[in-house]
Image (cartoon, rainbow, N blue to C red):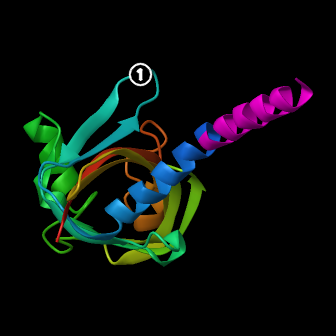
Amino acid sequence: MMTNTLISTAMRVGLIATLAYAPLAAQADTLAEVAGRYKIQSSSRVGFTVSQVGGGGITGDFKKFSGVFSLDNSNIGRSVIDFTLYPESVSTGQARVENFLRSDAVFDSANFPTITFKSTQITQTSPDTAEVAGILTARGKSGPASFQANLADHGKNSITFRVQGKIMRSRYGMDVGTPIYSNVVQFDMTIRGQRS
């Protein structure tokens, strides 16, 4: 009787251990599936907000961007991201605001047609999140920038991240309108990649 009880208890412990480790095994398979090189798709969204004293502010997105990222499942730190957006494509729903943002007061898109971000370090912060640090270059000025990336969805050949971060406008000579308009640009992006 005692032997049967011990065997039964051992089986239950074994089953619980198997169930507990099953998600980890599945996660390893998932990482193996998503590893690779991806091209950023035009269906992505690069949204931003600049708040204003008393409420309101400027909200918009960029319609044109490009880039690639490579995910290394054995060492997330070896993953890389290379992203370019085109400030001429800024969209806010207000032509006057868009023209102002494109002007030499802000993006100066005639002389600086691209804004680039190149990762320098990627640190996994949970099974499906990472902090992405790198160098952002705008208006001919470069500075450190970091974003938080959250794995939102993936298939066999596609992947989607929600990426958020804050950039100080003054670092790039675009702090016109402060302090009425915040010096901080908040980015909220949905980045979709297709395996290439």
Asked whether residue 87 is drawn in magenta, I would say no
* Label 1 CA crowd tier, 10 Å (few <14, some 14–19, many 20+): few
The residue sitting at the front extreme is 1
The quadrant holding residue 33 is bottom left
Vertical placement of 85 versus 112: above or below?
above
Can you give x and y, in whole percent of width and height, for residue 63 in the image? 12, 51
Q: With 124 as the anchor, is 36 left or right in this view?
A: left
Predominant secondary structure, magenta span: helix
In what element is the residue under mark 1? loop
Can you give x and y, in whole percent of width and height, for residue 84 in the image? 24, 68
What's drawn in magenta, residue-wise?
A: 1-18
**Which residue is pictured at 63% across the width and 39% down the height?**
20
Front residue (pair 45, 9): 9
In which quadrant will I find the C terminus?
bottom left
**Which residue is pictured at 78% across the width and 37% down the height?**
10
The residue sitting at the right extreme is 2
In which quadrant will I find the N terminus?
top right
Asked whether residue 4 is drawn in magenta, I would say yes
Can you give x and y, in whole percent of width and height, for residue 102 in the image? 17, 56
Front residue (pair 158, 172): 158
Front residue (pair 161, 24): 24
Name the residue type under label 1: Gly
Q: Which residue is mark 1?
A: 55
The answer to whether residue 138 shows anywhere in this view is: no
The quadrant holding residue 60 is top left
Vertical placement of 142 versus 14: above or below?
below
The quadrant holding residue 172 is bottom left
Vertical placement of 89 versus 97: above or below?
below
Q: With 96 as the anchor, is 116 left or right in this view?
A: right
Can you give x and y, in whole percent of width and height, for residue 99 in the image? 12, 49
